[in-house]
Image: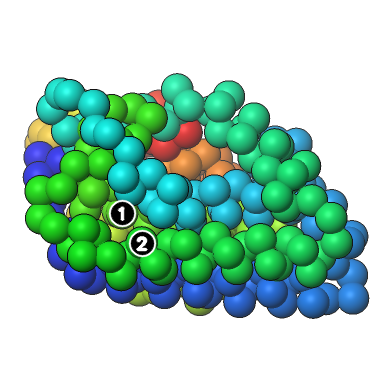
């Protein structure tokens, strides 16, 4: 069901460009801060990654399309977006190794060089998005899990830029101006991936104003889970635990089948 949702390709490209520019501004501000050296070494909520490693990973994510646009596409059916969400866990060791390598290489050195490296990554993405090929409907793209529609792969970049912008904001104690279409798309994709897992005993999930996943069966009284988009993104990606979210009031869970902890997180 969720894998059939359509995302307007032109809006996806515009939102991805906006997210990348907002991340550029955040990294420039970080690197211009008199405390930049300390901030780049600050811990994040991503295991033992520090901010420098997180910024390096975001740089890889942002510039991936530019570097891979012309790669040969493997044979096979394109991977669906909801399937991509489930496959991300399998790549965790490679992703971590790449981030550390870039943090020690391209993103090493003084804060100004980190900002320059990130600028180059964003510029690469923007050039790729401006290529005529980026707007070709049906164009396939090679990713680590197999072929995928390029238009769908750009949606995965929305996921990465929203999730990791929130990671960066958390590490620095700041807010982040997410593009509205980007946040809406990520909320919906993660809701669709949740529905695709088929939690037979789950409640209705409501993430206003962007997504609703009906309960798969009748429930009397009805079981309903409601939360805001960023809380849902954090739950679905393991940044926030279920019990903590409920206890803080960030999640409203009503009914005997409203505990979704068994099916979370969704994205690795």
Using residue 1 as the reference point, say whether residue 164 is left or right of it: right
Which secondary structure lies at badge 1? helix
- Position of residue 50 measured from the top left corner of the image (x, y, whole percent): 76, 47
- Position of residue 17 measured from the top left corner of the image (x, y, whole percent): 39, 70
From the viewer's side, name the closer residue of 184 and 244: 184
| Residue under the point 33% across and 27% down | 145
| Res 251 seen here | no
Q: Quadrant of residue 195?
A: top left
- Position of residue 248 measured from the top left corner of the image (x, y, whole percent): 57, 55
| Residue under the point 51% across and 65% down | 122
Q: Which mark is residue 247?
A: none
- Position of residue 267 measured from the top left corner of the image (x, y, whole percent): 42, 37
Look at the picture and state if 30 lies above or below 240. Answer: below
The span from disc 2 to disc 1 (Cα, nearest Å) is: 11 Å
From the viewer's side, name the closer residue of 152 and 108: 108
Within 10 Å of disc 2 (Cα), the crowding (few <14, some 14-19, many 20+) is: some
Residue under numbered circle 2: 128
| Residue under the point 41% across and 74% down | 18
Look at the picture and state if 146 lies above or below 155. Answer: above
From the viewer's side, name the closer residue of 170 and 73: 73
Using residue 203 as the reference point, say whether residue 51 is left or right of it: right
Using residue 261 as the reference point, say whether residue 199 is left or right of it: left
| Residue under the point 39% across and 35% down | 266
From the viewer's side, name the closer residue of 35 and 268: 35
Residue under numbered circle 1: 154
Look at the picture and state if 49 lies above or below 183. Answer: above
| Res 150 seen here | yes
């Amino acid at each position: 069901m969720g894998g059939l949702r359509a995302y307007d390709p032109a809006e996806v490209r515009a939102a991805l460009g906006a997210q990348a520019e907002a991340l550029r501004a955040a990294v420039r501000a970080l690197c211009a801060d008199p405390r930049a050296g300390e901030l780049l070494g600050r811990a994040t909520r991503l295991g033992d990654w520090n901010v420098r490693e997180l910024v390096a990973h975001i740089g890889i994510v942002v510039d991936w399309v530019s570097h891979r646009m012309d790669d040969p596409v493997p044979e096979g059916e394109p991977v669906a977006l909801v399937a991509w969400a489930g496959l991300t866990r399998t790549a965790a060791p490679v992703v971590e190794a790449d981030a550390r390598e870039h943090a020690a290489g391209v993103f090493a050195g003084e804060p100004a060089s980190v900002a320059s490296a990130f600028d180059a990554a964003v510029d690469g993405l923007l050039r790729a998005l401006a290529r005529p090929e980026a707007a070709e409907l049906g164009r396939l793209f090679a990713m680590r899990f197999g072929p995928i529609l390029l238009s769908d792969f750009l949606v995965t970049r929305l996921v990465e830029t929203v999730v990791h912008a929130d990671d960066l904001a958390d590490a620095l104690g700041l807010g982040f101006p997410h593009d509205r279409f980007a946040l809406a798309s990520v909320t919906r994709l993660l809701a669709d991936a949740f529905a695709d897992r088929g939690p037979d005993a789950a409640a209705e999930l409501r993430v206003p104003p962007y997504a609703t996943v009906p309960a798969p069966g009748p429930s009397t009284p009805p079981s309903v889970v409601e939360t805001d988009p960023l809380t849902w993104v954090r739950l679905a990606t393991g940044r926030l635990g279920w019990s903590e979210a409920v206890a803080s009031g960030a999640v409203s869970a009503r009914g005997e089948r409203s505990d979704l902890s068994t099916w979370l997180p969704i994205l690795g």
